[in-house]
Structures are given as structure tokens and as C-alpha cells.
Image: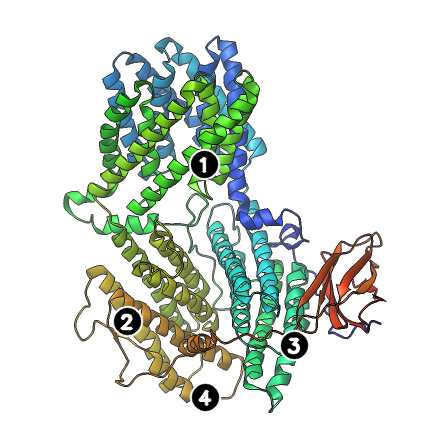
Amino acid sequence: MTTPDTLPDTATPPAAPAADLAPHRVAGPRRWWDWVLAADPGLGQLQAGWRSLVAMVTSLAVGYGMAEALRIPAMIGMMVAGMMGLMSAFAVAENTWDRLARAILWMPFPYTAVLWLCANLTGHRAAQMVLMISALALTFFLARFGPMALITGMMLFNGLMVGMLAGILAALVGKTFAVALVAAAAVLATRLLLCFPMPREDLLRTQRAFVVEARRVADAAVDALDPDADPERAVRRMDRSLRRLNITTVTIDGRLAQPEVAADPAAAELLHRHLFDAELALRGIGQATAELTRRPLPPPLREALAVGLVLARDTPLGRAEGLRPVAARVQERAEAILRDPAAPADDVEAAVLARRIGHLLDSLAASLHAWLTLGRTTSAGPADVPFRPTVALENNRLPGSAGPARRVLAAGSESGWRRVVPFVRVPVHAAVAAAIVCPIADAIDPRRFYWGLVGVMITLFGTNTTHERLRKFGHRMVGTVIGAVLGIVVLHLIGRDHVYATLAVIVAGLAFGAWGMQRAYACWVVGLVVALTQLYGLTTPDSGMNHLLGERLLDNGIGVLVATACAALIFPLSRRTVVKEAERGYVDALAQVVMQVEQRWTHPDEPVRLRGAARSVDAALIQVQSVVRPLVRMPVGVRGPAAEHRAALLATATGHARALAVAADVDVDLPPRLAERARLITATLTASLKELDRFFASGAPESADAGAWRRVGPLVRELEAELAPAPPGPRARRLATALRELDALDETLAAYAEQAGLPVAAEGRTAQAPASPMQRRTRSVMAAWNEPRHREPALTGTARVEGRVTCAAHPEGCAAWVTVISARGKRLAKSPVTAGGYAVDALPPGTHTLVVSSSRHAPRADLVTLDGPSGTARHDVELGA
């Protein structure tokens, strides 16, 4: 038998959301390509691959046609035009049509200018080599002056390389200019037609990726609550989902800062705030679920949580308000346990965590609903301010080590002749390394000495520390070997006489490399070497292919290692210094959060952007993590460098900073005495952060007395004790949460300061301070770490539930799926709805929850009771409007 409609109605339709910043493509139903958006937020990698495919096909076709029309060798025409396509795909990524046109149409001019110069130096090999070395150094010098200057330098170097490789005569330079100009115009036309820059669309795709990752977090939480699952594995999956969710939300903030994206700064700020709050709620759900996996959980509470999380996962974004009854149901189950005086202590602790998940589900519903109704929302409160950028993307990617490296160079070059160091440092590296590599590569193979220069160029572009250059060296070597093997295999399969097939493989290899470059540099090398192998195969016999590819590997390797050595010896920039500067930037960003908290509490009428300040902390943490990444990952259990330990502490502090930014964004109306005590807490924490900043700058505390981290935990607990008799309310709860987060933040940062070498002193106390909430949680986790987990016997059976899913609004049928959850909170089965019907087999006897999810409706949860161990029960579901 079945018993329907015994759970709260989760299908109540909310008001229709406005489709302003979250249109149907963001809030719409699930699509099969959602996993692509999650793996590549904004589709930046796919767009790079598509740009390369379009540009290379266009340029090669135009080059071949122009060579036939102008009666020049087809290889010269395709090389000249192909360089236009290659460089437009890799070096030009503007997001407006006018900047795109200006950059692409400029490329033929410096390119053919050096072709003419190289042709006039035919026979003067030493002069040509000196010219190439100078062009390489000039490229790095011009890189500091913007995209157009960088493109100019790259085209100068590439023109010299093609001129020497192809042996273009001076009489052909005019025709090659015509080929390059027509190819550039054709590439521009096809890019505007097939790859038109749409930054706002990229933002919407990134928002869709946020939705997909949010569903993954909820699904991973359901798996973690499964009583028969491996909790550690499920928690690791959930942590990965939370990391990807954070990267996606930070990327959204970076895209909001780009031109042509956020036309309304007030709406952009609201989008930033609502997504920040939604991420914080999801992160809290994940953390609470992880704690629940470490303790026994009452089956009714586990069932309510599992059903609630499945409904949260399957609720369409446009019906996010439907999560409120689910949140209420979870809170009711938790309150029932908390009201029971005979409830075991473990059940009470689990109920507290479950109640928190219920509150977070309610907060998540409010944030998502507010996101969708931005079209009807205006900025009205005193704390609502226009959006201001806090995250600056670099080539549509999150910033890495470039920021800290620039700050280190600027700090060390403020006076005297060292002012020119930031401008000439990398050009000098390139010139010296090229001068060393050129004779060596020329001795190995005079016809292809430029391979060594390519190794120098790729080493110095996009790297700032020796660790990064050595990682790039490893990627280059591994990618070359794999690409060579694949290229030779493909060459044998298609042969040497099928020109069009060879060109197709070349274009496909470059497109694959462009797609994978942002994921791993080795992917680009694999695609490039596969393409080059086909090109070499046109002129090199099988017996010489292995030797040729070996020479390329050797020349590239020499170029990379010499460039790395030059960068380490000439105007050196040590990794330790860059790491310290990245951590110093993080401390400064965190100090801005604490100072804005103080400003919010003492001057509530002044606009502050607490969430924006917390997002700056996220961006600073990403920079720290990028520079402390080790060259080789050690096995689990092997002690790593101190920088990695400090980065882990900063990651914990970032979580507390996010929670503090939301909880502290409330008007505080305290008596003068308590207000002064609250101000003392924030001022003391800010002073400690500034002292830490001075310590990083000078390497020593300011003085024996003042140079220490002053703990604010005792001050926080004293203020909490003063506020305890106050009547409860929303503002009181948020203030209490903010104080707890300040206490936990101080606890984490004190440990960080101690690891960094700054002394730690308690504020006005000599006795050991009582344990903070973070310490208590950590101790309870460690105490329960080796306790055996209670495993209930898994139920088995052969019962079957079948039925039909109907909908008055869609008589043709709705795409839906059915999930069955047991009373123990275990997800038993999942089945799609086919032709309006469903069937779920192999169910054990008992009462289960049947959740019907559809992309067009809010999910519906019914109870289904199976009386016997076998047989078939029928349960039909009619979805609401």
C-alpha cells in the first residue's frame, strides 16, 4: 500500500522571478552539458580552443588561396597566414569588437617589417641571430605596456623566426604583406562571425556553473549521510565541490569587474552579495554534514536531512522559495530531539547540527530567491553601495603569483638606478639566456637553432619564481614526449601524401592545445608537438624523425634550463620572498575586513562593503596557494614546508572571515560601555594584523613589548558574558555569531602568527585562555577519530513501486526522475520517468520517502509504505503547477 501527502507541501509555487540577471539559461532545467560548464566556468577553455580552430582554418585556407593568386610557394603563403591565425587565437582575447579589430589588423605591420629586414640580412647569419636575440628581449620589455605593445613584440620575434626558417626573399616581402593583411582581415571577419566576444554571456555561463556546483554540493552531502557509505570518501568529494564552488563565485566577481558586463553597478553589487550569501550557506551545510558523519545520527533525523538535501538539489532555481518548508521540516525534527529531556547526548549534538542545516537551507532559499528577483529590487539601505571590483582576472583566469611578484619588485626598486629594474629585469634575462642558448642550439642543428630561443621565451612568459619555471620545464618535457609518440602514430596512420588530412591533424592539435592550456601547460605542448610532427613529416623521412624530435626536446630543455638559471642569478626574486609578500597581501586584505566591521558597528550610516572585503580575502588566498604549491607533491603523512602549513591556516581563517562579513553586517545598538569594548576587540585585532604586516616587512617584531600578537579571545568572551542577559532577537543572534567568528578568527591567526615567527601574547592575562569554539570542535573531532562508527544492518528486499507521474500543465509529459530514500536516510534507488511512468525495484519493506523531481516543477516528497518483502505497490503522483 502507499500513503501519499504525508510530508509538507514542497510544491508551492512562489512568485515568478524577474529575468534580469538570472534568465532562463541560468535558472532553467538541467541540461546534459551542465558538466561542461562546471568543469570550465564561463567556457573560457572551450572558447580558446574554438578560436584557435576557426582562426587556423581561416588563415591556412586564405594563405593557400593567396599563394595561388600571387604565384608564390604555397608553403610560404600558409606559414605567413598561419602565423596570423595562431597569434590572433593566443595573443588576442579582447572582449569588445573594436579592440579586437585594432589588435588583429595591426599584426601584419610589425610582422612583415621584420620579414623585410631579415630578407636583407640574408647571408649575415650572425646579424640575424643578434637581431632575434634583440627582438626576444624587446618582446618582454614591451609586455609591460599593455596588450598592443605585447602583440607588437611577439610579431617582431615571430617574423624574424619565420623569415629565417622559410628563407623569404626581399622580392617576396610585398606579396607576403598582402597575404598577412588579407589573412588578418579574414580571421577578424570569422572571429566576429563565429567567435563574437560576449562578456555578459560569459558571466551568465559562470552563474550557471555556480548552480551546477551548488547541486553537486547537495548531492555530495546526501552521499555523506548515507549510513552505509564511506564517510571519508564522501566528505572528500564534498570538499572538492566546495572548492570548485568558491572558485566559480570568485570568478563571477572578477567577470563583474570587466567592461561591458555589469551595466548597473547597484544590481551588480546585489548579485555579488546574494551569491556570496548562497556560497556561505552551502559551505555551512557542507561543514555541518561533515561533522555529522563523525557521530551517530538518529534514523528519523537522518531521513529528514537526506530528504531535505535531495529536495534542495532538485528544486529548480526559479522555485527556490520552495526550500523553506523543507528547512522547517528539518528544524522540527531537530527541535523534537532537543525538547526531549531523555535524549542521549550524541543525539542532542546531532540535532544541534541538523537544526543549523535547517537554518542554512532557509538562508540558501532566501539568497537564491533574492538573486532571481534582482529585476524588482533596488538599492535602498544605507549599506547598499555600487559594485566595486575586488577580484581582477588575468586572461580570464584568477590571479596567481604575478601580483605578489610585482609588489616585491616595486618595493625593492623605489630609489636610484633600481627604479629601472622592474622594466629591464625580464628583458635582461631573455637577452642573456638567448645569447647563451643560441650558439649551443646552432651547434646542435644550425637550421633549427630557434628551438632553443622558443624554450627561453616560453620559460619567462607567465612565470615568476624558479619553482614555476621548473614545473613548466617538467610539463614541457613530458608534453613533448607524449606528443611525439602520438604524432608519430598519427603520421603512420594517415601517411605523408594526404595533405588535407595532415592539415586537419595540425589544426586539431593546435585547437586541443589551446583548449587545454589553462588546465595544464602539458596539454598545450602535446597538441603543439602532434601538429609539428605532421609538419615535419612532409620533409623528414621516418629514419630521421626520432632524431629530429630528440633535437627539439634537447634544444627546448636547454633553453628552459638556461633561462631558469639566468632568472635565478640576475636580479633574483626568490620564492620565499614572493611567498612572504603573498601572505602579507593576505594579512592586509584581512585587516580591511576587520576595519570595515568596526566601521559598520560604530558608523552604521556609512556605506561599507563587508562581503566585497571578504571576497578580496578569497582572492588573496588564491595568490598564496598559487605560490606555495610545491614542486613535487609528497605522499600523505610526509611533513611539508612551513609555508603549506601556514596556507592551510589561512584557508581556515578565510572561512571565518566570510562568516564574519555576513554576521557583522547588522546595525549594533549597544550602550556606550559595551560599544567601546566591541571597538576595543576590533581595534586590537587590527593592531595585531598590522604588527604581523610589519613583521613580514622587516623580518623582526617592532619591539620586545609591542611586537607580538595580542589575543582578543578573552575580550570577546567577556563581552559575550555581558550580552548574555540581553533579550534574544535576530540582531542579537547575528552579533553573537559575529563575536564567535572573531574569536575563532583570532584563534586561527594566532596559530598562524606563531608559525610565521611572531610571538603570541594573551590580552591582559597570564593564565591560559579557555578553549575557543574552534578548539572545542577540533578536540571533539580528534577524540572521536578512532571511535568505531555504528553501522546498522542494511535492509534488502525485492519489493517494487511503480506508478505514473502526471501534470495538468504539460499533458505531453514532463521529464522527471524518482528517488527513494529509506527511513534510515539511505538513498535506495533512482529511476527516470519514461513515457509518464516509473518503476523502482529491489526495495526493502518499510516506509520510505519517494521524491519526484522535475525540471519544470518543484520536487514533491511522498511517503510510501511497503508491507511485504515482495510484491508491487502502486503510487501515482500529480505534479503541481
The reply to whether discs 1 and 4 touch (Cβ–Cβ < 8 Å) is no
9 relative to 397 in the view: left or right: right
Residue visible at 51% across and 35% down in the picture: 512
Q: Which residue is mark 4?
A: 724
Q: Is residue 46 visible?
A: yes
Q: Work out whether mark 1 precedes mark 4 in sequence or the reverse, and give the earlier one.
A: 1
Q: Which residue is mark 1?
A: 524
Q: What's the distance in space between the residues labelled 1 and 2, CA to CA?
A: 47 Å
Front position in the image: 249 or 390: 249
Look at label 2 and name its amino acid: Ala
Foreground mark, 2 or 3?
Answer: 3
Q: Which residue is mark 3?
A: 299
Foreground mark, 3 or 1?
Answer: 3
Look at label 1 and name its amino acid: Trp
What kind of element bears circle 1? Answer: helix
Q: Which residue is mark 2?
A: 687
Look at label 4 and name its amino acid: Ala
